[in-house]
Image (cartoon, coloured by chain):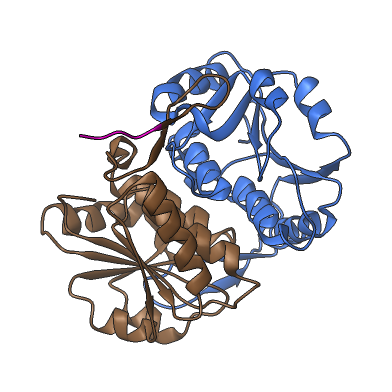
Chain colours: A blue, B brown
Amino acid sequence: MQTAPEVAVLRLGHRPGRDERMTTHVGLTARALGGDRVILPDNAGQSQSTVADITDRFGGPFEAELTESPNAVIREWEGRVVHLTMYGERVQDIEDDVRRAHRDDGEALLLVVGSEKVSFDVYEAADWNVGVTNQPHSEVAGLAVFLDRLFDGRELEREWEDADQRVVPTATGKRVEPADES
Amino acid sequence: MQTAPEVAVLRLGHRPGRDERMTTHVGLTARALGGDRVILPDNAGQSQSTVADITDRFGGPFEAELTESPNAVIREWEGRVVHLTMYGERVQDIEDDVRRAHRDDGEALLLVVGSEKVSFDVYEAADWNVGVTNQPHSEVAGLAVFLDRLFDGRELEREWEDADQRVVPTATGKRVEPADES
């Protein structure tokens, strides 16, 4: 998040149509909760556009990219790889190690978020396989909790650059203002 | 979560087909992260079945219900109502008040999670309108972060009853065991 080493999110697997919203929500969650970049499979162009459009309107910096080879992204990543999976070690046991690698050792992080089936290679390539609970739920929920814990809530204080509009927190109702930045 | 006052999640709005997975993920996230019950619109029977099936296999207690009138659920709720919305007050400013109401004052909580359009009535009926960031992202992500903060991470230590199987946290690979409870 901004001055810290990069945190990128890689989405594995995407079935056009069926996965459109889940993949889009992975990208938007990565953006909203402190990630710097999301990397989507190359058949997820529609999700990429949606995330880029939100970034144009609500600010960045945040990048949404496509890749032909998610496995190559993992293989060539310079930094540490965290694979979020319900089969992994408990997030509460692992998070300090990941935070230390990122914050103290300056390691860039790649957070890998699967869909239905993830090949065994990914489990082996990851520095950490991490479960946000060992229960079946949602890759979006797991990513959200992981990011909030990784950044210790500091992502909620993030400032946005080059936004067209901003939402003003309000007790009742909706308030949206033009973002006129200096 | 178990001995504490009830935490229920109400999903507003569901378009069969299009919203199936998001609604299912709302239900599974509510279950995995410490909720006691999810209440879905009555056209979301397929999501209800999926959540009930996961509860049968991986344990409970957790209830998945349908309602004909989500607005009546809000109106008649005995306790406090939290509406998660990107237009609301910042979660980091509100969470202590909600936690205190739940934990110290023994108030049951209804967490309301919208879909595309939420009527103004809901904003007015809520005790708190809360934004997990004031950015557009995912109702599943917002719910997940809110639950993790509400329970201060204690939901990750929860024990499951009447499960058929359990996942054993593992550094690499997948390990699932029959859950033979006494």
Quick one: A3 or A76, which is closer to the camera?
A76
The x, y position of residue B68, in whole percent, is: 39, 86
* Residue B133 appears in view: no
Residue at 76% over, 50% down? A14
The residue at 31%/57% (across/down) is: B62
Q: Is residue A97 left or right of residue A7?
A: left
Q: Quadrant of residue B6?
A: bottom left
Which secondary structure is most common in the magenta stretch?
A: loop
The magenta-colored residue range is B178-182
The reply to whether residue B70 is visible in this rendering is yes
Number of marks in the image? 0
Instruction: Quarter of the image for the C terminus of chain B: give it.
Output: top left
Please, is residue B3 above or below residue A1 in the view? Answer: below
Above or below — where is B176 with respect to B155?
A: above
Q: Residue furthest left?
A: B105
The image position of residue B170, as x and y in percent, is 49, 22
- Which residue corresponds to the image point at 71% horizontal and 56% vertical from the top-left? A55
- Residue A168 forms part of the magenta stretch: no
Left or right position of B36 against A52: left
Q: Is residue B180 magenta?
A: yes
Q: Quadrant of residue B112?
A: bottom left
Q: Is residue A41 left or right of residue B152?
A: right
Q: Which residue is drawn at 34% across and 37% down?
A: B156
